[in-house]
Image (tube, helix red, strand yellow):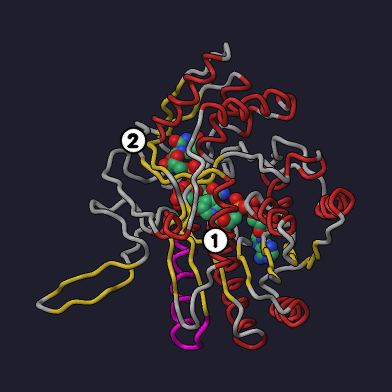
Amino acid sequence: MRIIIAGGDGFCGWPTALHFSERGHEVAIVDNCIRREWDKELGTRSLTPIATIQERLAAWKEITGKDIKLYYGDLQDYAFVRHVFEDFQPEAFVHFAEQRSAPYSMIDRDHAVFTQVNNVVGTLNVLFAIKETVPDCHLIKLGTMGEYGTPNIDIEEGYIRIQHKGREDVLPYPKQPFSFYHLSKVHDSHNIMFTCKAWGIRATDLNQGVVYGLWTDETRRDERLYNRVDYDGVFGTALNRFCVQAAVGHPLTVYGKGGQTRAFLDIRDTLQCIELAALHPADRGEFRVFNQFTEQFSVLQLAERVQKVAREMGLEANIEHLPNPRVEKEEHYYNAVHTKLLDLGLKPHYLSDELIRELIETAMRYRDRVDFDVIRPKVTWR
Ligand code: NAD
Ligand code: USQ
């Protein structure tokens, strides 16, 4: 299949691009590498040393003989996006290329506006380019479980059947997002749903939970193929952050009570899910929504799990309950349906002590790269 991975220099996109290339698909990456600039802006960097995108692609070619084409540019630039579609004629377009940090979107007005313009305009450009150049192309869009928030009822996969005043309909599941970033994903979902109806676009919205882990079969093959790991207070996410903290002797930063429950998955399952979505495309005009995660945990449960493994390794790993910088419920009901990807054949990698141990060991190997000053959260929601 001819497949584009937009955001292919990022944490999810890079291993996904390699995964498809390894399986013999014709792969192109679209990225403007702006994520590396945000690291500079925030005075942080990946725990693992990462090669430039050009070095990464040259290494992949050297090791496997396989080519991955690079389109270096910004999805906000419509002429660029149109050129990519005309030139590559993709059968599928996997869209990871957004500003994905909730705290980054909450820094101030400029960062909120940037996040929403970057994400919403980028996705609109992709939709117009599909319509105008390759109308049969399947859009596989990364959404987020955070679009739904934490309602006091079960979360369905995209849609809910509602009875109201004697009538019944299947409607989009209500959205109560956590941040301006999560809101940008809701805006995207609405734009995509509308264009599926209006133009017959085929689209799959993957409402992904928090991704943890690092290593995939392809990225561990050579240092130049290593993936990034974010551990800072802006881009770092819960489990990976706790593992790095345990490795370097920083207390595990649980915000508030830690009863916040979220959906999680291993990065290897991100790759599997994208592949399953690509191999089983949505129909023309269909707006399909999958909840992409494998397990639910509270933040405190995760911290305790990391603490247990760390202590077996002789590390201290104290848990510190920090005042919650975010506005979110710290104790709530959470039960989200996630059967559609399992029905397509997903074989989950459930969270294991071995994975936690390997992440801690990786962080110990690169502990000299860890800057304590960027670990604590500095951005507040209020
Ligand atoms: P990331 O920041 O590591 O990668 C995103 C990539 O997109 C970066 O390489 C960046 O340079 C690129 N990009 C951003 N804006 C762009 C633009 N306008 N034009 C071209 N390239 C652009 O993020 P990630 O962790 O890999 O997440 C990828 C996607 O998956 C995001 O859409 C995110 O919302 C979603 N997601 C991530 C997680 C997670 O835990 N990491 C969980 C759920 C959903
Ligand atoms: N949290 C802590 N301590 C930390 C970091 C986070 O207690 O050190 C808590 C947060 O308060 C929150 C939960 O852990 O309740 C998750 O936070 P996170 O930073 O791990 O993840 P989040 O902000 O939700 O965002 C991440 C990705 C985003 C993706 C989202 C999926 O950055 O791109 O959309 O996970 S979801 O959470 O399902 O919306």
Q: Amino acid at mark 1?
A: Leu
User: Residue at point 67% right, 60% down?
Assistant: 7
Residue receiving disc 2: 259
Question: In the image, which residues are magenta?
Answer: 183-201
User: Residue at point 59% right, 46% down?
Assistant: 268
Of all residues, the one furthest to the top in this rendering is: 314
User: Residue at point 81% right, 40% down?
Assistant: 222
**Count of marks placed on residues:** 2
Few, some or many residues within 10 Å of mark 1 (<14, 14–19, 20+): some
Visible residue check, residue 105: no
Residue 321 in the magenta stretch? The answer is no
Q: Nearer the viewer, residue 323 or 220?
A: 220
Residue receiving disc 1: 276
Horizontal side of residue 49 vs 124, given as left or right: right
User: Residue 229, position in %: x, y?
Assistant: 65, 40
User: Residue 45, position in %: x, y?
Assistant: 71, 40
User: Residue at point 58% right, 75% down?
Assistant: 138
Mark 2 falls on what kind of element?
loop
Q: Amino acid at mark 2?
A: Gly
Q: Earlier in the sequence, mark 1 or mark 2?
A: 2
Which image quadrant for residue 164? bottom left
Residue 193 in the magenta stretch? The answer is yes
User: Residue 61, position in %: x, y?
Assistant: 86, 54
Visible residue check, residue 86: yes
68 shown above or below 1: above
User: Residue 351, position in %: x, y?
Assistant: 49, 35
Which image quadrant for residue 6? bottom right
